[in-house]
Image (tube, grey):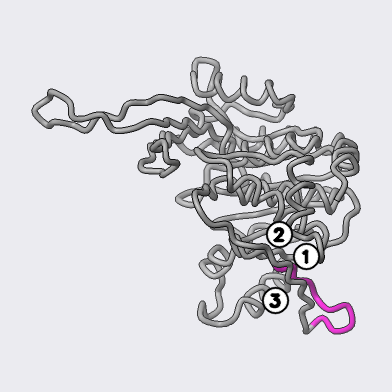
């Protein structure tokens, strides 16, 4: 794999990312005794603070790191929201176009506490209120305006507990009506993405969301989703083991074709946070760049492995890092 070829192909692409644009606050340090209060609370001494886009925001950063021109659409807080200020600055530093962002409630924010060894020990969620129908309509309108200026759309529906409207029926329907290639992923609402060309899910997500017996094999579950959604290609990731692409057999639509692309599980001190986003970005960008399914998954597997080695929260992989990993992982394959 040639990194220059990768970078050149990605640089010709543009994407609109619709999703939960979150702010991740990472605190890295160590315990240093107990406080003098009656409760004798454990003291965590923070040595490093990191502020980065999370959720769909991290997916956007992954695309930008590849060299894809990136625009985003979602919700964040008003101008008096400090977390919105930090998030907006993070996007601008990475040349990500924020013209599709709409003021909703406050910016979704997640605090993550890590020991210096890389172990994730605590998480703090800042709760955001559901957005109004008027805000959802405004977001859908912005998306409709932006789509003619990009090559494809990538939706990231990561909210599990409730639906904050970013990938609501109205928003997804707006994307669905476009003739652009459409990629999607959803932790709780796969069925909403009917008519999307590509879906990317892990095994847990499809097992949790199937209406079939959860004990049947993955292929039967995927077949059911493809028939109901009309998906062109359905990717199921398997953590560090790789991924499988499924599509209907062109000669017999009652059967599935599948391509298993294995990876090698990493050992030692790794952090899987952000690997799924990097896989998603690398796979979809590679498909759009003209690579076939197998090669695209190999590139995505390589990208995810690069990120897994980057500790303390979400990381990204450059075309140069991906090519280097690819040439090691698939040298003789």
Query: Can residue 254 be seen at all in this image of the molecule?
Result: yes
N-terminal-most mark, 1 or 3: 3
Q: Position of residue 121 (x, y in %)?
A: 36, 43
Q: Quadrant of residue 237?
A: bottom right
N-terminal-most mark, 2 or 1: 2
The Cα atoms of the two marked residues, 3 and 2, are separated by: 13 Å
Please report the residue visible at 80 percent of the width from the left and 56 percent of the height from the top: 296
Q: Quadrant of residue 35?
A: top left
User: Which quarter of the image is occupied by the C terminus?
Assistant: bottom right
The question of residue 248 being in magenta is answered with: yes
N-terminal-most mark, 3 or 2: 2
Secondary structure under badge 1?
strand
Residue 288 vs residue 171, the one in the foreground: 288
Q: Would you name the residue on which mark 2 appears?
A: 199
Can you tell which mark lies on residue 233?
1
Query: Can residue 17 be seen at all in this image of the molecule?
Result: no
Q: Are marks 2 and 1 in contact (CB under 8 Å)?
A: yes
Question: Is residue 95 toward the left or the right of residue 118 in the image?
Answer: right
Dot 1 crowding, Cα within 10 Å, few <14, some 14–19, many 20+? many
Secondary structure under badge 2?
strand
Q: Would you name the residue on which mark 3 appears?
A: 223
For the view shown, which residue lies furthest in the left direction?
A: 38
Question: Is residue 89 toward the left or the right of residue 251 in the image?
Answer: left
Q: Which residues are magenta?
A: 244-253
Can you say whether 267 is above or below 206 in the image? above
Dot 2 crowding, Cα within 10 Å, few <14, some 14–19, many 20+? many
Can you say whether 25 is above or below 269 in the image? above
The question of residue 11 being in magenta is answered with: no
The Cα atoms of the two marked residues, 1 and 3, are separated by: 11 Å
Please report the residue visible at 54 percent of the width from the left and 46 percent of the height from the top: 273
């Amino acid at each position: 794999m040639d990194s220059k070829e990768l970078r050149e192909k990605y640089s010709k692409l543009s994407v609109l990312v619709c999703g939960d644009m979150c702010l991740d606050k990472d605190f890295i340090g160590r315990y240093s005794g107990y406080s003098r209060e009656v409760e004798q609370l454990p003291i965590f001494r923070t040595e490093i603070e990191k502020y980065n886009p999370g959720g769909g925001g991290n997916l956007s950063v992954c695309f930008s790191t590849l060299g894809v021109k990136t625009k985003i659409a979602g919700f964040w807080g008003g101008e008096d929201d400090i977390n919105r200020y930090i998030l907006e600055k993070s996007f601008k530093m990475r040349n990500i176009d924020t013209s599709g962002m709409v003021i909703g409630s406050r910016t979704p924010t997640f605090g993550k506490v890590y020991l210096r060894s890389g172990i994730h020990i605590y998480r703090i969620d800042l709760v955001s209120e559901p957005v109004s129908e008027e805000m959802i309509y405004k977001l859908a309108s912005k998306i409709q305006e932006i789509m003619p200026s990009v090559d494809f759309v990538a939706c990231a529906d990561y909210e599990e507990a409730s639906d904050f409207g970013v990938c609501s029926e109205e928003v997804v329907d707006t994307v669905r009506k476009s003739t652009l290639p459409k990629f999607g992923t959803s932790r709780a609402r796969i069925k909403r993405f009917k008519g999307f060309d590509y879906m990317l899910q892990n095994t847990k997500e499809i097992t949790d969301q199937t209406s079939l017996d959860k004990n049947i094999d993955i292929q039967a579950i995927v077949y059911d989703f493809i028939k109901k959604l009309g998906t062109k290609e359905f990717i199921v990731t398997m953590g560090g083991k790789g991924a499988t692409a499924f599509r209907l057999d062109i000669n017999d639509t009652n059967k599935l074709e599948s391509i298993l692309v294995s990876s090698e599980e990493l050992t030692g001190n790794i952090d899987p946070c952000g690997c799924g986003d990097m896989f998603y970005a690398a796979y979809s960008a590679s498909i759009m760049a003209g690579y076939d399914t197998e090669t695209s998954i190999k590139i995505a597997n390589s990208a995810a492995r690069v990120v897994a080695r980057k500790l303390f929260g979400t990381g990204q992989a450059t075309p140069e890092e991906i090519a280097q990993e690819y040439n090691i992982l698939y040298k003789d394959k």
